[in-house]
Amino acid sequence: MQTTKAHWWFVGPALFLMVVILLMPIAIAGALSFTSYSLGNPGAEFVGLENYEKIFTRSTYEKMFGATFRYVFVVVPLSVGLGLGAALLINSTRRFGDLYKTIYFLPVMAALIAMAIVWEFAFHPTIGIVNSTLERGCGSVLEAWSWFARGCERGFPLWLTDRDYAIWTVAFIGVWQGFGFNMVLYLAGLTSVPRELYHAAEMDGAETAWDRFRLVTWPMLGPTTVFVVTISFIRSFQVFDTVEAFYPQGGGPSKSVYVMMFAIYEKAIQQNLMGIGSAITVVFLAFVMFLTLMQRWLVERRVHYT
Amino acid sequence: MTAISLSAIEKSFGTTPVLNGINLDIADGEFLTLVGPSGCGKSTLLRILAGLEAPSSGEVVIGGQTVNAVRPARRNLAMVFQSYALYPHLSVLQNMMTPLKLRDLSLAGRLPLLGPVLARAQYRAIVEQVRETAEILKIDHLLDRKPGQLSGGQRQRAALGRAMVRKPVAFLMDEPLSNLDAALRIHMRSELAELHRSLKTTFVYVTHDQAEALTMSDRMAVMMDGEILQLGAPHDVYNDPQDIRVAEFVGAPRINLLPGSLDNNGHARCGDIVLSRAATAGAVGSVSIGLRPEHLSLCEKGTPEALSGQVVHKENLGADIYLHVSVLNGSQRLVVRVAPHEGQGASFGQTVHIMREHGQALVFGKDRKRLDLKTAGTGNVAEVA
């Protein structure tokens, strides 16, 4: 039946590029993860599942997972929630909407590595603006808060170098940087909500803003939310530049900020342990794939209505 | 009894006036239609009544109470939107439950998952109420479907069901049939009229389709340029239009208008035709003479006062044939309704003769208002004959 091979010429270039620049590197990383390959070595030794065994048994990698999941599960809900809140607020104002949009979007546009340096100054224990501002509150009613009183007595925390605070501080910067992006996506989603649905909701007796949000806004933003959550997950799994800027010497105080991307970089690039680096990459890929597929299956079935 | 009263309603968007002092009283249980071309302000008036839009000035009274400051949700009106505005993520059952849930249930009862358990008796009553309404509208087999899985007509019924399920003071309908196909639209006209008869609730219906207004309403208000030109029963509006714009808008095909003038005795003339009825003395000047297609008929050559012209177009509607005839040397076009057996033979370019039914012509003055015609004395009749 087939008389022409023209179709191969049409899909060929795309297929070729996809294989060469996307699928092959993944396959190579997968293959390398079973070896002890180092860059520059002529050959590599097959070590089986040894690399994976290390990842799931050694305490360094336990810390890596801990830091990554702490970061992800703080940044995703907060940046999605704040993004939605900011979008709803901006959508409801008649004036200055564009100004707020610009302000909230600024951190997204700024290079995070440069912003990390600014934050480093802000969080500096002696000259930083954060702690000096907190110190001004000493002696006031704020001291009723025991955490604050302790800070006045013994000095406020070293935000970036205290292992109890470091990951949360980095997560805070992640939220600060990321929620403007989610806000823009939500603003786009809000423009496509039909005005008549709000009128129908009002006629049906939805008197409070919360009722209208529950009945119209939130369900109609379903497809946007799926996209925003997925994007936020992937972006926060990928966090690297803040960690590299703050802690170039390896993952922060007691490796409490040793996120996966940084681990890949440290193992594969800095220490030239390609095998273990590839193994972390494969695990990383598996997480992202799992989350993406789960969201598609669980949520998308319920948020597209036509 | 007056259910709804609008007085001196004005509305402008920026500097553009949309409504210029509308006064309208709607009786309890009445089917009132607001009809007019697009942009005449009829939808805005309905939305002001609903409370979705605030009037620039004027007063809205529902059930003897001024509701200008009352929000839409508290006015106890139900609205059917042109786009139906069903919640796409909810099934028909949930869509129809929404107004009852929002009004009858406490905050706790509306909680997802937990709510149906906390307020089980209330939920059962609500579902029962929805099922009853669905049976009336014959959509009880569709209750589990989402709006996206319904046809246009089924969505329309679901939207109607959502409005009907509680007992509102009045139903407001904003062109609810305009998204349906022609056959279904005609079918729904009679269904809506029947529904109104059985519910005995006030209906305020907005449409641009004069046929819907004529077929369904108890009274119709013809609106144009932000004003109500005429308010009355469909029969009166059609047969006794007070403004040339009303005469042109109501009736399909449109009324035929011939340019004419009033002579000193108040008789309107157009070429050889002179109307036997006369306007009040003193009125002179150019006028428009309106003749409905059904008041014209074909006649033999030589009939007095007949107009002759060529057939330029023929519309065959089955039961009737409308002949478009070019008269007065091609300067005017008349539409004549003829019976099929008469019209069948007419061919393009053929010369036909048209006679009018006496006493049916409508004369409009330069100010677009209708001129009252009275049967004049015998002396004048002689002149006419």
Image: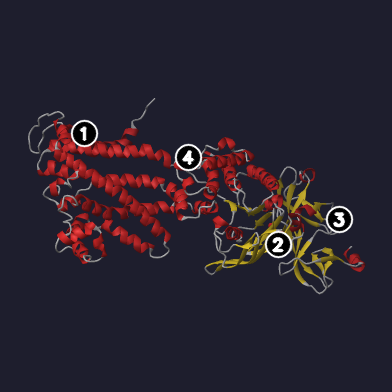
Give me the C-alpha separation between circle 4 and circle 1. Answer: 52 Å
Q: For marks 1 and 3, give the one nearer the viewer.
A: 1
Give me the C-alpha separation between circle 2 and circle 3. Answer: 37 Å
Q: Amino acid at mark 4?
A: Val
Residue B57 appears in view:
yes
Q: Which residue is mark 3?
A: B303
Q: Which residue is mark 4?
A: B117
Give me the C-alpha separation between circle 2 and circle 4. Answer: 54 Å
Disc number at residue A27?
1
Q: Are marks 2 and 4 on the same chain?
A: yes
The disc numbered 4 marks a residue on which chain? B
Q: Of helix, strand and loop, which one carries label 1?
A: helix
Q: Which residue is mark 2?
A: B230
Measuring from the top left, give residue A196's x and y in whole percent.
Answer: 51, 53
Q: Residue sitting at 27 percent across and 40 percent down?
A: A288
Measuring from the top left, give residue A4's x and y in whole percent.
Answer: 35, 30
Q: Amino acid at mark 2?
A: Gln
- Contact (Cβ within 8 Å) of mark 4 with mark 3: no
Q: Is residue B206 left or right of residue B238?
A: left
Quarter location, residue A20: top left
The disc numbered 1 marks a residue on which chain? A
* Label 2 vs 4, first from the N-terminus: 4
